[in-house]
Image (tube, coloured by chain):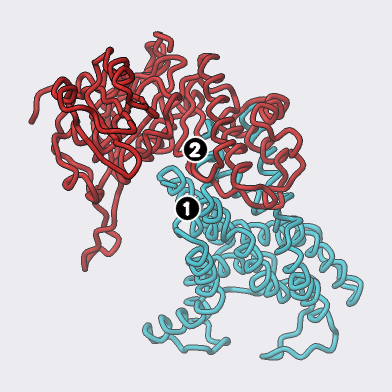
């Protein structure tokens, strides 16, 4: 991850207008859910995982970063200069969640059209088809594309004009595991070239081994942004290790470790313990335990959110109705 | 390539796509029937018209045949443009378009020019064919200046309906509403306007439906300035002799300019605020 800042968003916000009819004004609208006072610094070549539950404001934030929605307040800067919305759009490539490309237009014609919209050369647009693996299908009509190919086309269009920030909204939806793997490798290679990537998901596991930092969004507010380790440390998360053993761990040994979970099945015992005991594995093997699994367990999105907001699972669970206008607890800050 | 050139290129590509689309193939026979077909019919020397009107020159024949533009041309414009935005919005493509650096004003112009071009070109060709048919059949040839006014006015009414349809398409959240909005607007100005005019005339104590009553003609003429079809006919009437409906040529031109600018502005404003 590079240290140079590609783009910086300071205190940006947007609230959607929702219908609020009255008898004298049936078209009346009022401000509803949205995102508020988001600060986000994007380093060059950084891959940020934007995570949050349904309705957290991920898509709204991504649309703002892409210049589709205006910034109602706050500003965006790049190389020390404040950007207007047109300049912002020229620096950002956006791939929305599932575009249903369909018409008798070919991939070649579509790329040409978007090259004109983007203001880049047609040759560069055709070169990008090679990058996303659609070069051999460029004469196929959009109607003939599978979902995976449509995703690739969306990515190809997002890459037009060599953007410095690539914004991807739930890009893995509808992709098979092979395509996801290829997609992740492509994203990593783009990041190595200095392109910053923001990728949204509501599954932390999906972003495993891909992202450099996590940005945690909940009810329209950015709760935290940092590396997974830093986030866990600031949230007071202990690293957890999952152990699968063929027999129960001796009571004397259990006393020396903090067991968070123990599940017994017919054939094995599953333990989740606090990490930080380097000799434990050796001791277990010496005691004739057959260890089939030993892995560090990453926190789930729910656990992160619970830790970050101070809420319990039940409060976070299905409550996606409203953005919170009351500041939630922020990491490293004071609880309000 | 400059932004303007890119814009023209995109508009041309969009127009070509729409021009060779399936729906244009479906509409072409209708346009053929209504535009050259009407001109052929009205140029018949034995034609019997209501109120014993007899067209005495090619301009009058073309004026009568303009009903084909009002019915079929405008309907075709609406059918071509009604999903210009709503289709992309439903599929998610609109989001991709709006994230591109080309300004929304230019993208709006691309939509207008592309859709309008795709209907204006075949209609203009059919109008030229109609004028030739009238000349061929009745040996009355339309003067070049009248032909020019006729074609320009027809292109303008197509432009207005294209912009209305795109505006409706930008407001509608899905295809069904976009069709309902656009067809509803077409229905209002093409069919319901007569009812609206007579109702208002009756309320104002004017002799309703008496085409010989000057008071009614003037009332109707002025009210027609509020309808694109009415303004279209006012523009055509500037080339006819002995027509007085209380609106000067200048008034007709001014109304045409307003009917061009106001929906244009409304559409661009709408596009600037559009949330995909």
- Which chain identifier belongs to the cyan chain? B
- Which chain identifier belongs to the red chain? A
Question: Would you identify the image quadrant in which residue B211 lies?
Answer: bottom right
Q: Is residue B1 visible?
A: no
Q: Residues within 10 Å of mark 2 (few under 14, many from 20)?
A: many
CA distance for labels 2 and 1 = 41 Å
* Mark seen at residue B262: 1
Q: Residue furthest left?
A: A336
Could you say which is closer to the camera, residue B160 or residue B85? Answer: B85
Q: Position of residue B151 (x, y in %)?
A: 72, 59
Which residue does the image show at 56% across and 42% down from the upper left? Answer: A176
Q: Position of residue A172 (x, y in %)?
A: 50, 39
Could you say which is closer to the camera, residue B181 or residue B252? Answer: B181
Q: Determine whether A75 is above or below A154 in the image.
A: above
Chain letter behind tag 1 = B
* Mark seen at residue A171: 2
**Left/right of residue B233 with respect to residue B216 in the rendered view:** right
Chain letter behind tag 2 = A
Quadrant holding the N terminus of chain A: top left
**Left/right of residue B81 with respect to residue B52 in the rendered view:** left
Question: Would you identify the image quadrant in which residue A83 lies?
Answer: top left
């Amino acid at each position: 991850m590079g240290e140079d800042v590609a783009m910086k968003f300071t205190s940006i916000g947007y609230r959607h207008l929702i219908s609020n009819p009255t008898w004298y004004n049936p078209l009346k609208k009022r401000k509803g859910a949205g995102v508020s006072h988001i600060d986000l610094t994007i380093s060059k070549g950084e891959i940020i995982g934007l995570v949050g539950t349904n309705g957290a404001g991920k898509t709204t934030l991504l649309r703002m970063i892409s210049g589709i929605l205006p910034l109602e307040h706050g500003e965006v800067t790049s190389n020390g200069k404040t950007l207007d919305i047109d300049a912002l759009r020229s620096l950002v490539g956006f791939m929305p969640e599932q575009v249903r490309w369909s018409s008798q237009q070919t991939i070649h014609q579509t790329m040409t059209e978007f090259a004109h919209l983007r203001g880049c050369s047609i040759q560069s647009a055709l070169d990008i088809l090679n990058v996303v693996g659609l070069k051999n299908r460029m004469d196929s009509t959009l109607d003939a594309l599978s979902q995976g190919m449509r995703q690739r086309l969306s990515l190809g269009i997002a890459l037009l004009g060599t953007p410095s920030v690539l914004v991807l909204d739930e890009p893995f939806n509808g992709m098979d595991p092979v395509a996801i793997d290829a997609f992740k490798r492509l994203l990593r290679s783009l990041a190595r070239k200095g392109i910053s990537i923001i990728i949204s998901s509501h599954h932390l596991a999906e972003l495993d081994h891909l992202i450099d930092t996590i940005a945690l969004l909940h009810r329209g507010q950015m709760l935290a942004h940092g590396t997974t380790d830093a986030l866990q440390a600031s949230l007071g998360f202990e690293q957890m290790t999952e152990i699968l053993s063929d027999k129960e761990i001796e009571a004397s040994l259990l006393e020396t470790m903090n067991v968070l979970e123990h599940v017994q099945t017919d054939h094995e015992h599953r333990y989740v313990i606090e990490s930080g005991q380097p000799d434990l594995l050796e001791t277990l093997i010496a005691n004739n335990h057959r260890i089939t699994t030993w892995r560090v367990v990453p926190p789930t999105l729910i656990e992160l959110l619970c830790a970050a907001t101070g809420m319990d699972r039940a409060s976070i669970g299905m409550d996606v109705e409203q953005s919170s206008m009351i500041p939630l607890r922020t990491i490293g800050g004071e609880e309000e | 390539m400059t932004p303007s050139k890119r814009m023209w290129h995109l508009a041309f590509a969009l127009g070509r796509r729409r021009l060779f689309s399936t729906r244009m193939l479906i509409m072409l026979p209708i346009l053929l029937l209504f535009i050259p077909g009407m001109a052929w019919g009205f140029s018949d020397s034995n034609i019997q018209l209501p109120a014993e009107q007899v067209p005495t020159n090619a301009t009058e024949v073309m004026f009568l045949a303009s009903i084909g533009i009002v019915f079929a041309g405008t309907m075709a414009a609406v059918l071509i443009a009604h999903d210009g935005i709503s289709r992309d919005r439903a599929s998610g493509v609109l989001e991709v378009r709006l994230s591109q650096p080309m300004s929304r004003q230019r993208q709006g112009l691309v939509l207008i020019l592309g859709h309008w071009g795709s209907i204006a070109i075949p209609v203009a060709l059919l109008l030229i064919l109609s004028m030739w048919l009238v000349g061929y059949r009745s040996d009355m040839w339309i003067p070049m200046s009248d032909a020019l006014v006729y074609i320009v006015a027809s292109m303008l009414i197509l432009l207005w309906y294209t912009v209305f349809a795109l505006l409706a398409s930008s407001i509608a959240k899905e295809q069904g509403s976009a069709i309902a909005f656009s067809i509803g607007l077409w229905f209002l100005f093409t069919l319901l306007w007569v009812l609206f005019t007579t109702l208002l005339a009756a309320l104002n104590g004017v002799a309703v439906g008496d085409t010989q009553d000057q008071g009614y003609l003037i009332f109707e003429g002025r009210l027609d300035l509020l309808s694109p079809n009415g303004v279209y006919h006012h523009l055509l009437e500037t080339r006819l002799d002995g027509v007085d409906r209380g609106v000067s040529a200048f008034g007709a031109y001014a109304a045409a300019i307003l009917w061009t600018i106001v929906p244009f502005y409304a559409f661009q404003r709408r596009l600037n605020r559009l949330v995909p």
